[in-house]
Image: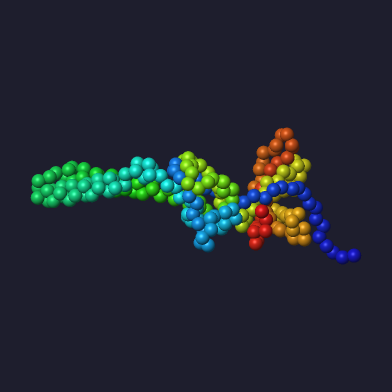
């Protein structure tokens, strides 16, 4: 006979999902080309990427021509020259302040146009929206046209994983935020992982008479999928 801890458990099952995920979105219509990794290979599912890494690029002469970057640059240079002339005339008393201010506004508008053009051109490079691993890349043949707002895959960060669990209404008094949860997986029968209750949904499902809780679990070594 020995002293020990007597425990009671609320047992249930659920599926794990990544704590963070984001779609890889193509914002421009044009020909799609995937970039190569550092090893010279095409990117595939499971490749680690950092936020901002280029995943694909879009080529479209029509889109580039519509932005008219060179025309905007020339317009800005003309506005800057006009402003310099107005300021010189104003210093000599040959122009009024309103003319100088109007010229300054034209320069400011030209600078904004250049920034806008560069933002639009940057959309031709498709970058990772967060750090994580590629998944669900679409099987799109390169050098084929994709439409704007097409999702070509996802980036997931599963260093921490989540699971939604359905708990019977009768067990609700025994569940609290921050409560420890012991997690086992059929692939690692000899290991027990520790999670915590992170969400306690107060709304009861009238069909199943259960309520939802969310559990957060650290994923050391990324063993969970």
Q: Is residue 95 left or right of residue 127?
A: left
Q: Answer yes or no: is residue 27 visible.
A: no
Q: Residue at x 18, y 47 (%)?
A: 82
Q: Residue at x 70, y 46 (%)?
A: 165
The one of 205 and 68 positioned closer to us in this rendering: 68
Screen quadrant of the N terminus: bottom right
Q: Residue 122: percent from the left, percent from the top?
A: 40, 50
Q: Answer yes or no: is residue 135 visible.
A: yes
Q: Residue 84: percent from the left, percent from the top?
A: 17, 51
Q: Residue at x 38, y 44 (%)?
A: 61
Q: Residue 102: percent from the left, percent from the top?
A: 21, 43
Q: Residue 209: percent from the left, percent from the top?
A: 74, 37
Most extreme residue toward the right is 1
The one of 197 and 146 positioned closer to us in this rendering: 146
Location of residue 30 by image quarter = top left
Location of residue 224 by image quarter = bottom right
């Amino acid at each position: 006979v020995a002293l020990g801890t007597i425990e009671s458990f609320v047992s249930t099952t659920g599926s794990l999902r990544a704590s963070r995920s984001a779609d890889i979105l193509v914002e421009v219509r044009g020909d799609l080309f995937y970039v190569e990794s550092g090893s010279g290979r095409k990117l595939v599912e499971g490749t680690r990427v950092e936020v901002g890494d280029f995943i694909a690029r879009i080529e479209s002469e029509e889109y580039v021509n519509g932005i008219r970057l060179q025309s905007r640059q020339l317009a800005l240079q003309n506005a800057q020259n006009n402003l310099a002339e107005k300021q010189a005339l104003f210093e000599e008393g040959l122009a009024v302040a309103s003319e100088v201010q109007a010229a300054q506004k034209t320069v400011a508008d030209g600078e904004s146009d250049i920034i806008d053009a560069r933002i639009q051109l940057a959309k031709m490079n498709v970058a990772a929206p967060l750090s994580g691993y590629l998944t669900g890349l679409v099987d799109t043949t390169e050098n084929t046209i994709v439409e704007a707002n097409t999702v070509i895959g996802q980036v997931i960060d599963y260093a921490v994983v989540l699971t939604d669990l359905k708990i019977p209404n009768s067990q609700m008094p025994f569940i609290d935020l921050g409560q420890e949860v012991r997690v086992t997986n059929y692939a690692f029968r000899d290991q027990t992982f520790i999670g915590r209750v992170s969400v306690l949904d107060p709304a009861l499902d009238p069909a199943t008479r259960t309520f939802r809780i969310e559990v957060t679990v650290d994923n050391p070594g990324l063993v969970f999928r």
